[in-house]
Amino acid sequence: MTIVRSMLAFDMPPALTRDDAARIAALAQLDLSDDELDTLARQLGDILAYAEQVQQIDTTGVAPTASIVTRHAVDRRDELQPSLDRDTALANAPDPALDAGLFKVPRVIG
């Protein structure tokens, strides 16, 4: 088996430092303690190391795929099915206008 060089546009850092973790936490607007920063640096470093390992896998001759599933549940045929009639659907509405098929709700945007 031939090992293929990473196809990433950049090289992954050999190790993730605590300063790197602090910058990432700041970007994510996370206020982390020193212990949490150490844990984050270690965990992110492990993730990057695993990603590097995956990048080294030889995929020569393997066709690109977006999904291994050939049919999706969303591919089903549209079929008419019974539904609630308007009066039943609006029966428990807070302030229904049955003739218009609408109901009022409290304003949520000021």
Image (spheres, rainbow, N blue to C red):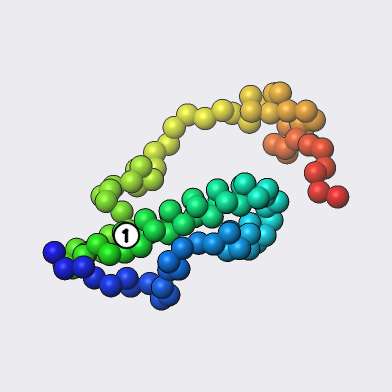
The residue positioned farthest toward the left in the image shown = 1
Residue closest to the eye, 86 or 108? 108
Q: Position of residue 98 (x, y in %)?
A: 73, 31
* Image quarter hosting the N terminus: bottom left
- Residue at 61% across / 47% down in the picture? 36
Instruction: Name, please, the residue furthest toward the bottom.
Output: 9
Residue 77 visible within the image: no
Residue 85 horizontal side relative to residue 12, left or right:
right
Q: Nearer the viewer, residue 58 or 18?
A: 18
- Residue 52 position by quadrant: bottom left
Q: What's under tag 1, amino acid-wise?
A: Gln
Element type at mark 1:
helix
Which residue is located at x 67 percent, y 60 percent?
A: 26
Say which quarter of the image contains residue 53: bottom left
- Looking at the image, residue 75 lies above or below residue 55: above
Location of residue 72 with respect to 102 vertically, above or below: below
Q: Is residue 98 left or right of residue 2?
A: right
As drawn, 53 above or below 105 = below
Q: Position of residue 77 (x, y in %)?
A: 35, 43
Question: Is residue 21 left or right of 6 when viewed as pictured?
Answer: right
Residue that label 1 marks: 53
- Crowd band around label 1 with a 10 angstrom C-alpha radius: few (<14), some (14–19), many (20+): few
Question: In the figure, is residue 48 to the left or right of 88?
Answer: left
